[in-house]
Image: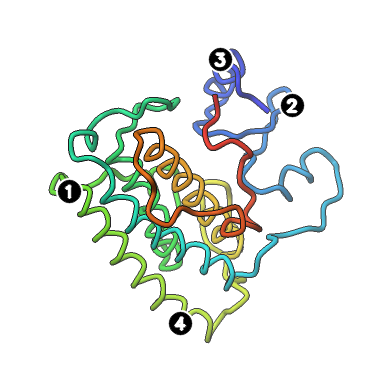
Amino acid sequence: MFNDPDGLAQLDALGVKTTPVVARGNDYVLGQVITDVAKFLGLKFEGGPALTPKQLVGKADMVLAAAQRFAPQIPQDKFGELLPMSGRKRTYRELAHHLVRIQEAMMEATQGVEFTIEQPVRPPADSITKPAQIADYAAGVQRRLREWWAAQEQTDPNCRKVVKTYFGDQPLAVLLERCAWHSAQHTRQLQYLLGRMGIEPDQPLTADDLKGLPLPEKVWEE
């Protein structure tokens, strides 16, 4: 697994634009799906997502609800500032938007739009200038998620449909899990940042809320 400057430079030379990656010489596999990593390493792994698609959608719904509570708590004067800790140059505005946009991109993938690296990081519209507008955006995506799942549950409740992603063609269930934990991790970060500013998060997420999602141990990697 590459996480050092020399390793990242080698990956760039190989044309790899995202991490995590497991590499061996000039061969590599994207580390987004544990079954792919196990196969690459010659290991046997018969597991899958710990949660069912219905449970994963429930987690995503929970995260979008949290975004509606947390985003308005971001002070207006901080909204456009860069985050105090991040390997990327991302603002509070971009972080809050991104955690919502991930779910929107997931639903787009179910309609045939490839889930590329760029899709979930599409920047917020210039018209989004206030924290409360992120909450409105999250409410709209949450409503669409619920409507989408109501139809999806009737036709493909196990989410076996294959969708195109930057880490290969995957069953929708795999993308659901990835997007659920990805949004949840950024929500943990936003919750942490509020606390760091001395603001008590409105109904903070708990360990039980996030149980079953393959989240990193740390809220922020150093």
Evaluate if marks 1 and 3 touch, with contact meaning CB atoms under 8 Å apart.
no
Q: Which residue is mark 1?
A: 128
Residue found at the very far bottom of the displayed protein: 154
Neighbours of disc 2 within 10 Å: few (<14), some (14-19), many (20+): few
**Residue occupying image coordinates x 82% and y 58%:** 46
| CA–CA distance in space, label 2 to label 1 | 43 Å
Residue 150 is tagged as 4
Instruction: Give the foreground label among 2 and 1.
Output: 1
Q: Earlier in the sequence, mark 1 or mark 3?
A: 3
Tell me the quadrant of the picture where the C terminus can be found.
top right
Q: Which residue is mark 2?
A: 24
Instruction: Give the foreground label among 4 and 3.
Output: 4
Which structural element holds mark 4?
A: helix
In the rendered view, tell whether residue 122 sits above or below residue 14: below
In the rendered view, tell whether residue 119 sits above or below residue 192: below
Residue type pointed to by label 4: Ala
Residue type pointed to by label 1: Ile
Residue 36 pos. (x, y %): 71, 47
Which structural element holds mark 3?
A: helix
Which structural element holds mark 2?
A: strand
In the rendered view, tell whether residue 190 sits above or below residue 107: above
Q: Earlier in the sequence, mark 4 or mark 3?
A: 3
Residue type pointed to by label 2: Arg
